[in-house]
Amino acid sequence: MIFANGSILPDSELEVVLSRLEEELPQILGGPPLEAATVLDALEALGNELDNGALDPLIAQFAPPGAREELDRVRPQIGRAALEERLDLELGGLSGPRPFGRAEVRPLGVLLHVAPGNMAGLPAFTAAEGLLTGNINLVKLPRGDKGLTLAVFQKLTELEPDLSPYLYAFDIPSKDTASLGRLAALADGIVTWGGDGAVSAMRELAPAGCRLIEWGHRLSFAYLSDWEGADLSALAEHIVSTGGLLCSSCQVIFLDTEYLSVGEQFCKKFLPVLEKAAMAHYKTPGQAAQAALYARETALEQVVDRAGSDDLNFPGQCCSLTLRRDCELELSHLHGNVLVKRLPRGEIIPTLRRQRGRLQTAGLLCPEGAREELTALLARAGVNRITAPGHMSHTFPLEAHDGEYPLRRYVRVVDVENKF
């Protein structure tokens, strides 16, 4: 399906919509600019409908299980006050008087968003960031989007019809490079959230002069120093609840030790905690059975894929831990099946630097006296977020995104001389 000019259209209209866009975009860009206040009013009205339950039928129809809880958790960060603070923090100071005249902040113009599918609502969120900066937004929907983004766009344009020319969505498969190429040719910036393959593909399609804005896949991990006596339940709940699907999900639990025996002790202590979190998360017999099956498949895959390795496996109920002898950061198996490795603090920087550009969140658990040292080491290694282990996938007011302020990437600064 397609969303264009406030309406949902069938895919058969793609050619018509693309042809019209080529004609209409210059007219929209030449008209009055989209004011941030207009967008804030519309998003505030949408938030009020979320709060009073008016959107619950849409969420139940189009969003995956657990989406309502996730929206409730991030709701404070998408409220009007939080968005106004973001605008002030990220764009404040970019415009104003200069010795030569003045500086003005202007939108890039047209943004093509290659939206992610690993979290409900992200396609709408990335478009909202484009709206806040005054851009026209063309959204390529992820394969897993079942209609939620289209429903949100329709509701948003019903609440504020002036947004209609600034929101478009296309259910185009990634293999349709011809249509994607036509969209890319219209864009002043391409916002891509995918992995290396998606980023490389958009680099190929991006026209010369088009700004490529990458929010690619990232790797996150927990780093535990002196974990004896610590409450590890929050880390376990994070691992199970995110399923390893998010860029902020813990992929490896690193232990600040050189000794394999310490790793074994940790696994034996942590496995019951992880099992408890898994059994609490998988509430129905069907969910528990599916999780148990996945854990069993993970164990069998490791037997086949790493035959002859000296991994130490700790299978649990609906989850598992695998203690490996190397210290590399890599993806774990999903859904509560996690890697454990040793990483003495003296090896943090040389080890993590091998994944430079891909690092995101480190969940740090350590004695208070070691916090500043370990925080500095992780930051120097390239980590962009350092949190408590149980907060790795939490969002915080006014935080950066992968080490950058997104809104700044969606605008340009125009310098104007006073006298010429």
Image (tube, helix red, strand yellow):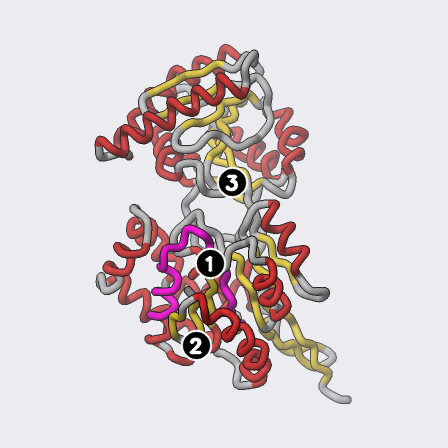
Can you tell which of label 2 and label 3 is closer to the viewer?
2
Q: Can residue 374 be seen at all in this image of the molecule?
A: yes
Vertical order, 141 against 159 (above or below): above
Write the residue at 22% across / 61% down. 53
Residue annotated with mark 2? 5
Residue annotated with mark 1? 141
**Alpha carbons under labels 2 and 3: distance apart:** 39 Å
Please give left or right for residue 357 compared with residue 86 in the image.
right
Write the residue at 33% across / 75% down. 159
Can you tell which of label 3 and label 1 is closer to the viewer?
1
Residue annotated with mark 3? 361
The residue furthest front is 12
Asked if the stretch drawn in magenta spans residue 330, the answer is: no
For the residue carrying disc 2, how many other residues have a C-alpha within 10 Å: few (<14), some (14-19), or many (20+)?
A: some
- Which amino acid lies under the numbered mark 2 shown in the image of this protein? Asn
The residue furthest right is 420
Asked if the stretch drawn in magenta spans residue 153, the answer is: yes
- Closest to the observer, 371 or 219: 219
Label 2–label 3 contact, CB within 8 A: no
Label 1–label 2 contact, CB within 8 A: no
Q: Can residue 259 be seen at all in this image of the molecule?
A: no
Region rendered in magenta: 135-155
Q: Secondary structure at mark 1?
A: loop
